[in-house]
């Protein structure tokens, strides 16, 4: 019995060490999804957000989304932030019409990563784009700090939709959560509204 407990402890410590560098600051790479319907061949870049809400320097990227809209960074964020994610170009199948839509190379969507977030998944959708614009408006016109504005808009969206739209990926597989499926339905509903 004692041997099993010791082996479990050793395995746990080994796992923790493999997830952190010797200085304890590294974390798993960031990954995510770009979706209006899944956007393939989009270029994703992560930027620091400045205290006035403007875009700072590029932190990572660009990464290219696969045919399912997924991307993964080759580096990890070590806290800090907040960050802005920009996804430019690509194409997707419109849920309302079934037609393939190409996005101009200089056009796209924005997302946001809260301060202190590491090793997580991030969604970039029309909903996160709106959230990003809202937080910048709150910094510019309401005098909020960038961290407070990000926290406020993310919490407000979570209260409205029932899940965090910045970290929940809109995926509709058999084993996916209800939140992910609800996100897919929200994007499809938005597409149908635009068509009407």
Image (cartoon, rainbow, N blue to C red):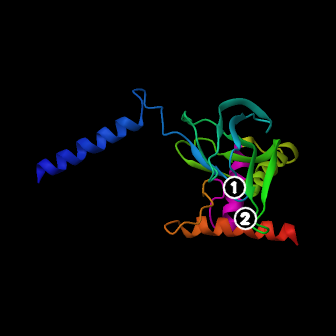
Front in this rendered view, residue 161 or 92: 92
Q: Main secondary structure of the magenta part?
A: helix
| Quarter location, residue 45 | top right
Q: With 3 as the anchor, is 96 left or right in this view?
A: right
Measured as percent of width and height from the top left, residue 181 is found at 61, 68
Badge 1 vs badge 2, beta-carbon distance below 8 Å: yes
Front in this rendered view, residue 116 or 38: 38
Residue drawn where x is 60% and y is 57% of the image = 169
126 above or below 85? below
Dot 1 or dot 2: first in sequence order is 1
Q: Quadrant of the C terminus?
A: bottom right
Residue 100: numbered disc: none
Name the residue at the bottom extreme.
Answer: 196
Q: Quadrant of the N terminus?
A: bottom left
Instruction: Using the numbered discs, state the Cα–Cα distance from disc 1 to disc 2 in whole angstroms.
Output: 8 Å
Q: With 79 as the anchor, is 82 left or right in this view?
A: right
- Mark 1 residue element: loop
Residue 35: numbered disc: 1
Q: Give the range drawn in magenta.
A: 147-166
Does the magenta portion include 59?
Answer: no
28 above or below 151? above
Q: Mark 2 points at which residue?
A: 187
Measured as percent of width and height from the top left, residue 28 is found at 48, 40
- Mark 2 residue element: helix
Residue drawn where x is 42% and y is 29% of the image = 21
């Amino acid at each position: 019995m004692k041997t099993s407990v010791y082996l479990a402890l050793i395995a746990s410590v080994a796992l923790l060490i493999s997830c952190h560098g010797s200085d304890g600051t590294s974390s798993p790479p960031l990954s995510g999804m770009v979706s209006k319907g899944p956007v393939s061949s989009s270029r994703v870049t992560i930027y620091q957000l400045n205290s006035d809400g403007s875009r700072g320097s590029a932190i990572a990227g660009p990464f290219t989304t696969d045919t399912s809209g997924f991307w993964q960074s080759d580096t990890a964020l070590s806290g800090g932030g907040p960050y802005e994610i920009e996804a430019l170009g690509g194409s997707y199948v419109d849920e309302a019409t079934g037609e393939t839509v190409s996005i101009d190379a200089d056009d796209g969507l924005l997302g946001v990563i809260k301060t202190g977030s590491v090793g997580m998944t991030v969604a970039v959708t029309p909903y996160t784009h709106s959230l990003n614009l809202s937080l910048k408006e709150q910094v510019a016109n309401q005098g909020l700090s960038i961290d407070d504005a990000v926290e406020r808009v993310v919490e407000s969206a979570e209260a409205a939709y029932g899940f965090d739209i910045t970290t929940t990926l809109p995926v509709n597989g058999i084993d996916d959560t209800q939140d992910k499926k609800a996100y897919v339905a929200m994007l499809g509903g938005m597409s149908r509204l635009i068509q009407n």
